[in-house]
Structures are given as structure tokens and as C-alpha cells.
């Protein structure tokens, strides 16, 4: 039995670094969106905005014409773009925070480390956009990205705290380990 446990511990130790793979993948996705020209990026945002208003039109049976839908889509396009920014960085923060938690980073240190990585990447991403045709860096976008990252970090903190802390006076993991050592 102890040989199996040792083998499991070795396997877990070897696999731990791969827990950052989703974060690296998310960074690649964000980078690829930022590498799109202004025209391509704008067309994608408009297409998604149009899909939203078209779906709303079908569900509510408002009977709007394509021109009205187009005008409405143009009106929400800015908000769709900013929601996409927040969502990307929320997912990035989650994919960074979970591995940090696995490595034992908790509380304020998790928030600071994951936050620094996300905000730093947001700044670098905006700088990268300054080299892309018809795109430019935006401090406001870094702020929006940072808000998304904060939401992601807080979600991970809340999830990990709620699943790993047992209410009702049950022993914590640390206390259980100490009591096992005494036996």
C-alpha cells in the first residue's frame, strides 16, 4: 500500500507543473485576439452583437427589420467588446489562481500574485496592440481587464474556501495531519 502511495505522490509531483497549461492556453487565446487587425476585430464584435440582438428579436418577437437590428447591434457593440475583455481576463485569472492554490499559495498572496500576473499580461497585451494595424493601446482596457481578473481571483478564493473549509467545528486539514502524526 505504501508503494502505491509513494508512486501516487511522485506522479502528482510530476504532473503539478502541467496545472499551468490552461493559463498558458488562455494567454495564447488572448494574444491571438489582440493580433487581429482593427477591421477583423471590429467585424467579429459586430457579428456577435448582431447575433445577440437577432436572438433577442426572435425570442421577444419584436419584428424589427434588419436595419433596426443593425442599428441596435452597433449600439451594444462597445459593451460586447468590453464584456469580452472582462471574460477573457476572468478566465485567465481562474486558470492562474487554481494552480497557485495547488502549490500552496493562499489568501492575499494568491490575490497579489495572480493579480500581478494578470494585470502585467494585460499591460503587455495592450502594448502588443500598438503594433497591430488599426489597433492601439488603452489604459481603460487594462482597467477593464483588471476588473475581470479580480472577479476571477475572488471566484477561485470563494470556491476554494467554501469547498476546503468545513463548517460546524470539524477539524481542519492541518489539525487532522497533526492528530495523525501523534498516533
Image (spheres, rainbow, N blue to C red):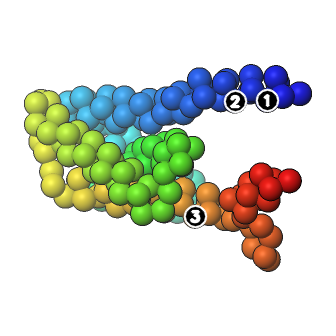
- The foreground one among 1 and 12 is 1
Image point (31%, 56%), residue name: 146
Crowding around mark 1 (Cα neighbors within 10 Å: few <14, some 14 to 19, many 20+) is few
Q: Position of residue 89 (x, y in %)?
A: 38, 48
Residue linked to disc 3 = 158
Tell me, for residue 9, which label it has, or none.
Answer: 2
Image spot of residue 108 (x, y percent): 42, 63
Q: Horizontal and vertical percent for residue 164?
A: 69, 59
Q: Tell me whether circle 2 and circle 1 mark residues in contact (CB < 8 Å).
A: yes
- Which disc is residue 5 wearing? 1
Upstream in the sequence, badge 3 or badge 1?
1
For label 1, the SS is helix
142 w.r.t. 2: above or below = below
Q: Nearer the viewer, mark 3 or mark 2?
A: 2
| Left or right: residue 169 compared with residue 158 | right
Side (left or right) of 149 relative to 37 = right
Amino acid at each position: 500500500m505504501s508503494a502505491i502511495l509513494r508512486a501516487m505522490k511522485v506522479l502528482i509531483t510530476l504532473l503539478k507543473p502541467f496545472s499551468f497549461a490552461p493559463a498558458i492556453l488562455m494567454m495564447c487565446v488572448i494574444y491571438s485576439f489582440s493580433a487581429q487587425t482593427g477591421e477583423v476585430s471590429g467585424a467579429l464584435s459586430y457579428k456577435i452583437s448582431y447575433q445577440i440582438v437577432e436572438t433577442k428579436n426572435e425570442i421577444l418577437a419584436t419584428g424589427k427589420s434588419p436595419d433596426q437590428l443593425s442599428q441596435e447591434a452597433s449600439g451594444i457593440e462597445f459593451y460586447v467588446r468590453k464584456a469580452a475583455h472582462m471574460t477573457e481576463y476572468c478566465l485567465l485569472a481562474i486558470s492562474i489562481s487554481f494552480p497557485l492554490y495547488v502549490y500552496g499559495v493562499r489568501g492575499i498572496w494568491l490575490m497579489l500574485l495572480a493579480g500581478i500576473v494578470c494585470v502585467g499580461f494585460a499591460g503587455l497585451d495592450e502594448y502588443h496592440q500598438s503594433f497591430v494595424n488599426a489597433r492601439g493601446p488603452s489604459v481603460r482596457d487594462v482597467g477593464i481587464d483588471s476588473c475581470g481578473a479580480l472577479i476571477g481571483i475572488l471566484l477561485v478564493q470563494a470556491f476554494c474556501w467554501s469547498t476546503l473549509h468545513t463548517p460546524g467545528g470539524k477539524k481542519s486539514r492541518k489539525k487532522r495531519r497533526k492528530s495523525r502524526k501523534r498516533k
